[in-house]
Amino acid sequence: MDAKVAVIGVGSIGSMTLWQLARGGVDAIGFEQYAPGHDQAAAGGESRIFRTAYLEGPQYVPLLLRARELWRELERESGRPLLTLCGGLMIGAGGSEAMRNVVESATSFDLPHEVLDAAEMGRRYPQHRMLPGETAVLDEWAGVLRPEFAVLAAAQAARARGARVVTGCRVTGVEPSADGVRVHTPERSYTVEQAVVTAGPWTARFAPGLARHITPKKLVMTWYPARDVAAYTPDSFPIFIRESGDVHIFGIPTLDGGSVKVAPHASYGDLADADDLDRNVAAAELEPINAAVERLLPGLDPTPVRVSTYVDAYTTDGHAVVGRMPGAENVWVLGAFSGHGFKMAPAFGQVAAELVTEGKTSLPIEHLDPARFAG
Ligand SMILES: Cc1cc2nc3c(=O)[nH]c(=O)nc-3n(C[C@H](O)[C@H](O)[C@H](O)COP(=O)(O)OP(=O)(O)OC[C@H]3O[C@@H](n4cnc5c(N)ncnc54)[C@H](O)[C@@H]3O)c2cc1C
């Protein structure tokens, strides 16, 4: 045996899985095609939103609350600041499904929040131009994560506790065998008792039984100059998610002292494989997001100063696949986080560590069972 557990992909979820396994004293080895903390997959682009009043549904709140605790533990263990809580505004039409989920999450779990009408928004957050019928919920436990540093911190913390990471190594196959699981790489094969596939945008390659329900998508992020930078710092401008008619955008306060990230929720297209990502973006493709910035955020210059491209894998129902890999003994999959997995990454690291050591987890993942797509 080369290790008890192999982790395929040391990105957002894989780095946290290694960290949690190492904390539990489990002999684990991670494989990463680049190096932990890179920006070539789903975790690049400077910032990620953390929030707890969850528009995707209240079933996520226990995972989010556990993640919040683990982010602080990772900060203590690594000595790096990773999560800045600056509050979060969810803005949309009063009765929409997303706003109902936000309010239900906040009230059912007693999360600190405020409901703000347009007049109150105008007084406190004039950076947003509210439209008729819109309301906002301020989630006090929302903020900004630093994704590249967080992945690096988790991988370093895992290594400090004895985990190994093989970098610059692209796994070519994961194959259950009589003596455990074989992990194939171009140089050699490794034998382990169990494998955890956390390959992010490349998940479908390792999950043929789920592949037709998983699609890598191109995502583009854009940063706009602020006319008055002081109005967009984390202490004056909460992260936001906004559904105004057919405009779905999110935004993050300035982290570089000049530009504000505002980007569309929608993808820039499906890919047959994550390797097919074309990082170029035509100027015409930016027109809708520029128009949204001009209409809804009047304090920003609607011409982006920075544009960058990433990829994440999406399932057909927008919820990840977390559990046993269908048809593969001793292999687990945590993938296709569908554009909203980063904030919960340390909680899913705990889930993965519990699944390989106990066969079950204390956190609620029923809605993420891969079996819903199998067969
Ligand atoms: C532009 C953008 C904005 C987002 N905004 C948010 C947000 O604000 N909040 C939020 O919570 N979520 C957000 N998300 C979603 C979140 O970032 C992703 O869901 C999450 O990072 C996915 O983590 P992952 O571990 O599955 O993938 P990754 O972090 O990409 O990790 C997968 C790793 O596996 C490696 N790998 C793949 N195949 C192999 C192989 N064969 N051999 C070796 N290594 C391999 C990759 O190199 C990579 O390092 C956003 C995503 C994008 C793209």
Image: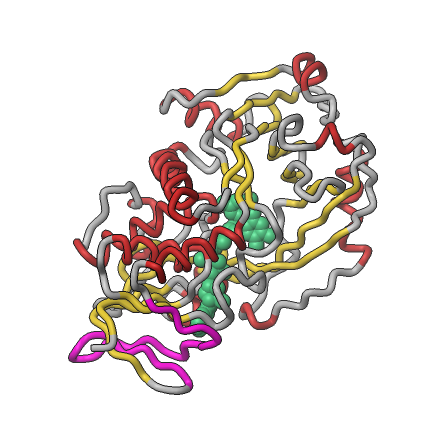
**Residue ID at (23%, 52%):** 354
* Left or right of 357 on screen, residue 364: right
Which image quarter: residue 227?
Answer: top right
Residue range in magenta is: 164-186
**Residue ID at (66%, 13%):** 120
Rendered position, 157 above or below 82: below
**In this view of the protein, can residue 186 be seen by the observer?**
yes
**Residue ID at (76%, 55%):** 285
The percent position of residue 73, horizontal first and vertical second, equals 37, 42
- Total label count? 0
Q: What colour scheme does the image use? A: secondary structure
Rendered position, 272 above or below 352: below
* Left or right of 306 on screen, residue 48: left
* Left or right of 195 on screen, residue 108: right
**Residue ID at (27%, 53%):** 23
The percent position of residue 174, horizontal first and vertical second, equals 33, 75
The percent position of residue 302, horizontal first and vertical second, equals 82, 41
